[in-house]
Amino acid sequence: MLTMEVLLPSTGVTEQSPFYDVLVLLTFLINVVGWSILFSWYFGSPLSVMANGVMNLHKGDGSEVIKKAYSGSGRLKTRFRLYKEVIVSIEQLSVDLEKLAKDRIKLEKEKKEWMAGISHDLKTPLTYMKGYSALLLNEGYEWSSEETRSFLEEIEKKSNHMEGLINDLSITFQVEETLPTNKELVEMNGFMKGILSPLNADPRFQTPPFSIDDSSSKIWV
């Protein structure tokens, strides 16, 4: 109507002008195509942006959606407001995925450190076992039955310690969420002696020496 009553008459084109019908049809087609392109851009470009954003979510990156959907002042652009809930969901999912990626990296690092600690913990009793075994197999010295028994008791103690570590390692790989708790009554004086005994035999810890005052009554935990 605007074309026929305003635009064409303002350019001197009337119903009596040659090719009037062709000009009206051409103007109508231009209007239809122009408005179609405008509406396609207005409603379609947000869909394209969100589709690309969803495709990039596997990388934990939703920055493209945020950058294109929000203005410099941080407000949602007009043509994106129809899809506000979807955009907010994509943004939140992107944040969650990024956090999960960081947590996974942290977990892998802690796992490697933990495995290194387990390896060290296994080597320590193994070193003592090899040492006591070498002493017992030393043909240049005749050990008394009391000394032999003492060495064998230490070897058994270290073997039990290694077995406990291996069991802990096995349980850790089997359990996905929480580790089972095994409570055991322990007398703390004897427990501390067991910890300090290997250190007292290590030359690196001779100065100052370790000692424990167990003159008090037994402490059970």
Image (cartoon, rainbow, N blue to C red):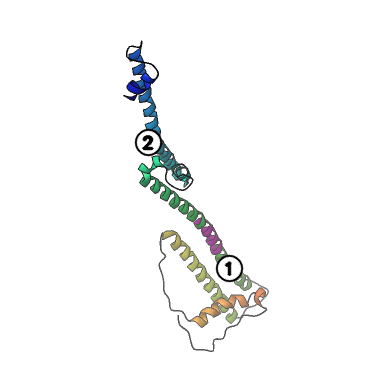
In the displayed structure, 157 sits above or below 82; it is: below
Identify the secondary structure beneath mark 2.
Answer: helix
The numbered mark at residue 124 is 1
> How far is disc 1 from disc 2 in space, using C-alphas?
68 Å
Q: On the rendered structure, is 23 left or right of 107? A: left
Q: Which one is in front, 200 or 83? A: 83
**118 to 84, vertically: above or below:** below
The foreground one among 185 and 112 is 112
Dividing the picture into quadrants, the one containing residue 147 is: bottom right
Locate residue 87 relative to residue 195 in the image: left or right.
left
Q: x%, y% of residue 72?
A: 49, 45
Residue 128, x across and y down, in percent: 59, 70
Mark seen at residue 43: 2
Q: Which amino acid does label 2 sit on?
A: Phe
The magenta stretch spans which residues? 107-118
Residue 125 falls inside the magenta stretch: no
